[in-house]
Image: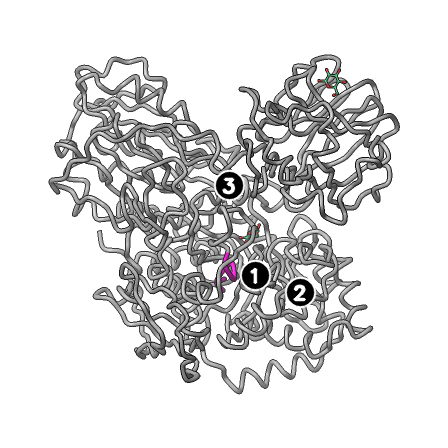
Amino acid sequence: MARRSPGWSRARRTTVAALAGLTLLGGVAHAAPSPAAAPAPAAQPEIGQPALDKNGCARIEQNLPTLSDWPKVDSQIAKNPKDEQRIAQIVAGMTLEEKVGQMTQPEISAITPDEVKQYAIGSVLNGGGSWPGGNKHATQQDWLNLADAYWTASKSTRTRIPVIWGIDAVHGNNNVYGATVFPQNIALGAAHDSCLVRDVENATARQIRATGQDWAFAPTLAVVQDDRWGRTYEGFSEDPRITRAYGYEAINGLQDGATKRIGYNGVIATAKHFIGDGGTTNGQDQGVNASSEADMINIHGQGYYGALAAGSQTVMASFNSWTNPDLGINEGKIHGSDKALNQILKGKIGFDGLVVSDWNGIGQVTGCTNASCPRAINAGIDLVMVPNDWKAFITNTVAQVRDGEIAQSRIDDAVTRILRVKLRAGILDEQKPSDRSYANSDEALKDNWLARDAVRESQTLLKNNNNVLPLKPKSKVLVVGKSADSISNQTGGWTLSWQGTGNTNADFPNATSILGGLRQDLGTANVTYDPTGTVDPKGYDAVIAVIGETPYAEGVGDLQRKTLEAAKLYPEDLATLDKVSGKGTPVVTVYVSGRPLYVNKELNRSDAFVEAWLPGTEGGGVADMLVKGKDGTGFQAKLSYSWPKSACQTPLNPWSPNYDPLFPLGYGLKTGQHATVGQLDETEGPVTCGSTGGGGTATEDLPIFDRTAVAPYQAFIGSAENWGGTLIGPNGTASHSAINVVPADVNVQADGLKTTWTGTGAGQVYLQNPSGTNDLRGYLNADSALEFDVIVNSPPVNRTVVSMHCVYPCFSEVKATKLFTDLPAGQKATVKIPLSCFANGLDFQNVNTPFLVYTDGAFSASFANVRWSPGGAKDPDAKACSDLT
Ligand code: BGC
Ligand code: BGC
């Protein structure tokens, strides 16, 4: 049962932290209120190596000292003068073009090995769901062949600097067919075991070496405050104390505890996403973090103090903004923030590795495009993730250095940092990827027993009335529920594909479903599988219902205004439970999810309730915990996220006002513990959290379409063939005779509906609440505008309208032919139409369709981020109604 524990040797230095102005709230460090008298200027806090726990890994501290300023972090990988000399020599011999090439990171589907050579490229990446040759089933050998080809190309440049390949190995080497996939970070957080994280990440490093990459875009160190965020499961915890200790050991695992050179077990790691990704308003992906600087330091910064002390060689900039005008904070997108990157990360904290930008992240900085962003480079981005537009990026950047927009010294610093990382990774002197340790090792790629152990350690027992669990060996069970035999549901996002969707069990040759695990543990004859719930539970020792969330990644998983109510998000699960509960046979629910949800109804219909998180490919670990004799020391895990007791209870953290969770942070039953969870309140939540207007004055945006339709709205197209409309499904595709839609990039990957009117008749694209109308008067009262981002691909040839419906034929419309014709084709624009332009005809108390575009000739445009925005009508760039008649 013991995990492989490499012999970690590490200097033990104690944490030195300035304790100025510290208060503790509920045992968690929290920023002190401003003292009345100005204190004497404190010395900058310093952070070194952490204290260790009884297993020899970073201890999860009870109390983290509140820091009064950004600390200086002392990395266990120290600067070495000899290395610095060697790097300076290489940099001195490079041309400007070679330097900019070194700073450029294209995507593997957009660059050939020959081009790596031609442009002296420094790094490549594969995005989530991108594989060699575009083949999901690419073999280990295919991955290695491509890695070798890029490497060989880079070694035949004038400078002979090897290229490095970065990959999103965020829960194991999860893009690779056949690889063992570990539990997502939220599950590891529940284990409260920093050695477990170290071991999982060390195994992940070997998996990466097995397929020839050099660099993991992991770990995510988000300290997640609002669980509506679609990346909640990528964070270890809402509690910075856990993230700090885990950050340290995750880096030790990936970089193999390196103090000088990353060894033959390790790869380069990435602390991401700096900074504040877990603290955006409403949990919106890539949104605005409005934290005070004290909270940035003491909450969102903590994971970095651990990771950088362990020597993380790279940091990825975050997509979010850092803005709060009331506090005088106006950094905007972190990618363009000199303060965040240069002054804080590289200055105060003292990070000497490289800062990589996120996927087209530079294009989101004001004044920039995906192919040009002097501001981001000047702010401190060293290596630029520019998946597709890399050629133009190189041309533009070289020109910007020549004309002085970017200083030569900034380029030299960026290249110095990149080479420093390559040198410390041992890559400057390495042989080709297929000749390195673990290359092509099937054993390294498959670490099922470690994964199974990680799963067991992370299973969190929330309810166990009458000690239903563990089941007796050889119990006869009836297994129901959509996730019992779904590797895709149990692995979640970032698994083979970006979203984790589109995979079947056949795509996971090296995996065990939870059902498979139960068959192993109880004997196949004792397990009846009944996915649809038609079998009478009478006569079985227990029903095991495996239900929960379905896969998502990044913003696609944002709940936005939707509530946390599982019964609304996944009604099929409640239906399953209703069929089996109350029949006299105990019901054990295994909940497979990437975040806590409001599950009171589901809990009431279960005698025992296990939160399984997203366990990965080893469903056997889930099964083990349910069966006596297989469950080791029994349930030990504790929530690293608070659990809500009502539908809109988010953000919900120990430092939230009136903290009143159903299960607090740190809750988790142990096997055999006597505890009863009584009947819970089943009050249904509203359709959406937050105000939808009503008769007052709206203050927050009404999101209508944000990468996907936002509840209660759904996206449709209609044409003369079917005005009733065809639902545009989650894949963003639909078509009719005169109109079709496919996904397109407007602001971010696949966030838009590319709508094409073919010219053969009338058609419309629209967002509608299919189950009724909403009172949205508050938006009109708030001087709101209908706002959307759009790229016109080809302008309309006939009359085009934007309209809103209060159940057709109740509607109002404005003429928009000229509006769309005037927009520069092929470029993104934001359109703002005052709601008052629709006031004549639209009944704002009964709106069912808040957005509709209609035309009867050819037209093509990609629409994204459709919303009603309070105050938008007063923006200087809002349209005048008189322009739209
Ligand atoms: C994500 C990063 C990821 C990158 C490369 C981005 O969309 O935010 O976490 O590393 O893509 O795939
Ligand atoms: C109607 C059309 C109308 C269009 C534009 C549709 O729902 O059926 O006749 O022209 O909306 O508002």
Q: In the image, is residue 329 part of the stretch drawn in magenta?
A: no
Task: Provide the residue designation for mark 3.
Answer: 558
In the rendered structure, the answer to whether residue 344 lies left or right of residue 67 reads right
In the image, residue 111 sits, relative to residue 609, either above or below, namely below
Q: Nearer the viewer, mark 1 or mark 3?
A: 3
Q: Which residues are magenta?
A: 268-276
Q: What colouring does the structure picture have?
A: one colour
Amino acid type at image mark 1 = Ala
Q: Is residue 313 visible?
A: yes
Left or right: residue 416 compared with residue 689? right
- Identify whether 364 is placed above or below 686: below
Residue at the spot of label 2: 376
Residue flagged by tag 3: what amino acid is it? Answer: Asp
Looking at marks 3 and 2 on the same chain, the residue that comes earlier in the sequence is marked by 2
Q: Which residue is mark 1?
A: 317
Mark 1 or 3 closer to N-term? Answer: 1
Disc number for residue 518: none
Q: Is residue 216 visible?
A: no
Quadrant in which the C terminus appears? top right
